[in-house]
Image (spheres, rainbow, N blue to C red):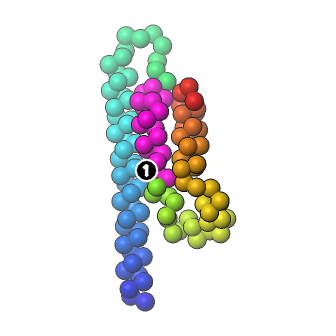
Amino acid sequence: MKHFHMQEDQTMNTRKTRIRATLGSLAMLLAVSQTAFAQGGTESKPQSLYDRLGGLAPIAVVVSDFIDALVPDAVLNANPAIDAARTRVPAPYLKYHVTALVCQVTGGPC
């Protein structure tokens, strides 16, 4: 029983580390976008959030890291509906659609 709890603690620490790394990437993207927006103050029309985030590539990286952190999450997979959905929908397909969604709602051309 003790071994199980140690393994569970390691899994939780790994998951927390991945989520922190993803959030750090998002914070860095936002900081860069703030700087780019501040430097572009001569424009009459403000940049879209999509442009301030750096476009499709940085958004795709953050979404990919986020999905990679969520897919193996034991707490979420304990829910039978989530586990069944993850069995039916491969992670790359989910990444594509979430990236397209973020692209669209941030004002991108997606």
Query: Would residue 107 be visible to someone looking at this image?
Result: no
Residue 105 lies in magenta, yes or no?
A: no
Query: Which residue appears at 58% of the width and 33% of the height?
Result: 105
Query: Would residue 100 be visible to someone looking at this image?
Result: yes
Percent across and percent down for residue 48 are 49, 24
Q: Specify the segment rendered in magenta.
A: 50-67
Percent across and percent down for residue 71 are 52, 60
Which quadrant would the C terminus be assigned to in this image? top right
Task: Look at the magenta stretch and give its main secondary structure.
Answer: helix
Q: Report the amino acid beneath label 1.
A: Asp
Percent across and percent down for residue 58 are 41, 37
**How many callouts does the rendering have?**
1
Query: Which residue appears at 53% of the width and 40% of the height?
Result: 99
Residue 94 relative to residue 67: left or right: right
Determine the secondary structure under disc 1.
helix
Q: Is residue 18 above or below residue 74?
A: above
Residue 65 lies in magenta, yes or no?
A: yes
Q: Name the residue under label 1.
A: 65
Query: Which residue appears at 38% of the width and 86% of the height?
Result: 3
Q: Is residue 10 above or below residue 32?
A: below
Percent across and percent down for residue 93 are 58, 48
Residue 108 relative to residue 36: left or right: right
Q: Find the residue positioned furthest to the bottom.
A: 1
Q: In this view, does 37 lie above or below 56?
A: above
Looking at the image, which is closer to me, 28 or 103?
103
Say few, some or many: other residues with alpha carbon within 10 Å of mark 1 (under 14 / 14 to 19 / 20 or more).
some
Which quadrant would the N terminus be assigned to in this image? bottom left
Query: Which residue appears at 37% of the width and 65% of the height?
Result: 14
